[in-house]
């Protein structure tokens, strides 16, 4: 596996089936975006949201969204 870290957990038992540097902390990236998209699409499909539904975020969420996790690349 080329990934720097990974973890595979059995959903039913909670048993870790595979791990590679699983405790290393990385900033959220693609998996967070994919999960967000999945949840939004589920809410749209179940009519809990529409494409025009306004979504509010807290001041704290806005504040931390402005933090650059990779300042060395600017």
Image: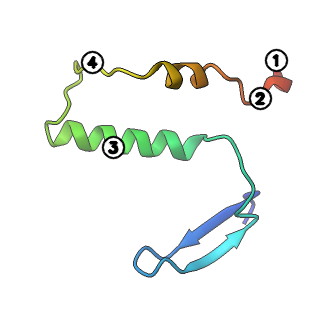
Q: Quadrant of the N terminus?
A: bottom right
**Does 8 appear above or below 3?**
below
Q: Are marks 3 and 4 in contact (CB under 8 Å)?
A: no
The tally of labels here is 4
Q: Circles 1 and 2: CB distance less than 8 Å?
A: yes
- Which residue position is annotated with label 1? 74
| Horizontal side of residue 4 vs 18, given as left or right | right
* Residue drawn at x 52%, y 23% as measured from the top left: 60
Q: CA distance from mark 1 to mark 4?
A: 32 Å
Where does residue 11 sit, x and y in percent of width and height?
43, 73
Q: Residue furthest right?
A: 72
> Quadrant of the image for the C terminus?
top right
Q: Are marks 3 and 1 in contact (CB under 8 Å)?
A: no
Residue visible at 54% across and 47% down in the picture: 31
Residue at image position (41%, 22%) is: 57
Give the structural element (helix, strand or loop) at label 1: loop
Question: Which residue matches tag 3?
Answer: 39
Q: How is the image coloured?
A: rainbow
Q: Nearer the viewer, mark 1 or mark 4?
A: 4
Q: Give the alpha-carbon distance from disc 2 to disc 4, as whole Å.
A: 30 Å
Q: Earlier in the sequence, mark 2 or mark 3?
A: 3
Q: CA distance from mark 3 to mark 1?
A: 32 Å
**Which label is found at residue 70?**
2
> Helix, strand or loop at disc 4?
loop
Classify residue 39 as left or right of residue 59.
Answer: left
Callout 2 touching callout 4 (CB < 8 Å): no
Q: Residues within 10 Å of mark 3 (few under 14, many from 20)?
A: few
The crowd level at tag 1 (other Cα within 10 Å; few <14, some 14-19, many 20+) is few
Q: Neighbour class for label 2 at 10 Å: few (<14), some, many (≥20)?
A: few
Name the mark on residue 54: 4
Image coordinates for residue 26, horizontal then vertical, percent: 71, 46
First of labels 2, 4 by sequence position? 4
């Amino acid at each position: 596996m080329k990934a720097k870290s990974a973890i595979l957990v059995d959903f039913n038992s909670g048993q870790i089936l595979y791990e590679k540097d699983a405790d290393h902390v990385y900033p959220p990236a693609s998996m967070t975006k994919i999960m967000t998209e999945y949840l939004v699409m589920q809410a749209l499909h179940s009519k809990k949201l529409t494409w025009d539904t306004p979504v509010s975020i807290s001041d704290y969420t806005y504040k931390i969204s402005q933090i650059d996790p990779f300042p060395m690349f600017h």
